[in-house]
Image (spheres, rainbow, N blue to C red):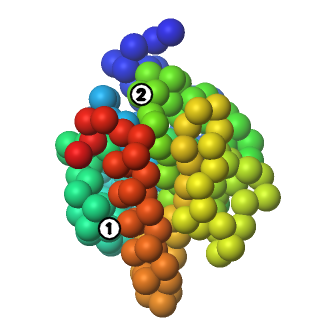
Amino acid sequence: MMNWDELEQTCLSCRKCGLADTRTHVVFGVGSRDAEVLFVGEGPGENEDLQGEPFVGRGGKLLDEMLTIIDLDRTKNIYIANIVKCRPPQNRDPLNTEQDACIGYLRNQVSLLRPKIIVCLGRIAAMKLIKEDFKITREHGQWFQKSGVWMTALYHPAALLRDPRRKPETFDDLKSIQAKIREVCDHTY
Ligand code: URA
């Protein structure tokens, strides 16, 4: 097993798929390597590609506000990563081939972190990590247990920016995540 720094160095020089040709930065992930809660998005957008950090655009600002509601902070008590580490051109959904080329990095991040809870941000991450027929409108906020890890999904912050009518449901989902953290985590709060 690689350690965190070895995994990050390997990932930063990855050329496993075509996204390597168009990226500015590999977006490996951010947060505490001792976190009990892992958030997973789909892949970097333009701002993330330019800065090398997940969720730093308008959606990132909203995500940070959502996290603050339940006393979570990307610099303190969670880790944030993506299914694919490089930006898909024009922010299209990552292809299945690109997801399959990249998912090993996320699996290694999960092995190192050993999170108690994984929160998928949006449909793409939920379909990859929870179940392939995941329906985000019906199943956001529901809990699934997979190999000892509690998993749920929230609407993607970009979806909430497009359709703010989904914010009240998301508030309920955040409160459910807070309750689950109190139940199963020992050093998040
Ligand atoms: N959207 C994502 O899914 N991930 C990011 O890092 C940024 C935007």
**Can see residue 89?**
no
- Residue at x 56% of width, y 48% of height: 151
- In the figure, 36 relative to 41: above or below? above
Q: Which residue is mark 1?
A: 66
Give the number of callouts.
2
Which residue shows up at 26% across the image and 49% down it?
Answer: 74
Mark 1 belongs to which amino acid? Met
Query: In the image, 140: left or right of 86?
Result: right
Dot 1 falls on a residue whose secondary structure is helix
Task: Tell me the element at label 2.
Answer: helix
Q: Is mark 1 within 8 Å of ligand 1?
A: no
Mark 2 — residue?
113
Instruction: Return the residue found at the far top.
Output: 1
Residue toward you, 57 or 187: 187
Q: Amino acid at mark 2?
A: Leu
Q: What residue is rendered at 27% in x and 42% in y?
A: 188
Relative horizontal placement of residue 103, taking residue 51 as reference (left or right): right
What's the residue at 50%, 45% (across, down)? 118
Indicate the quadrant where residue 90 lies. bottom right
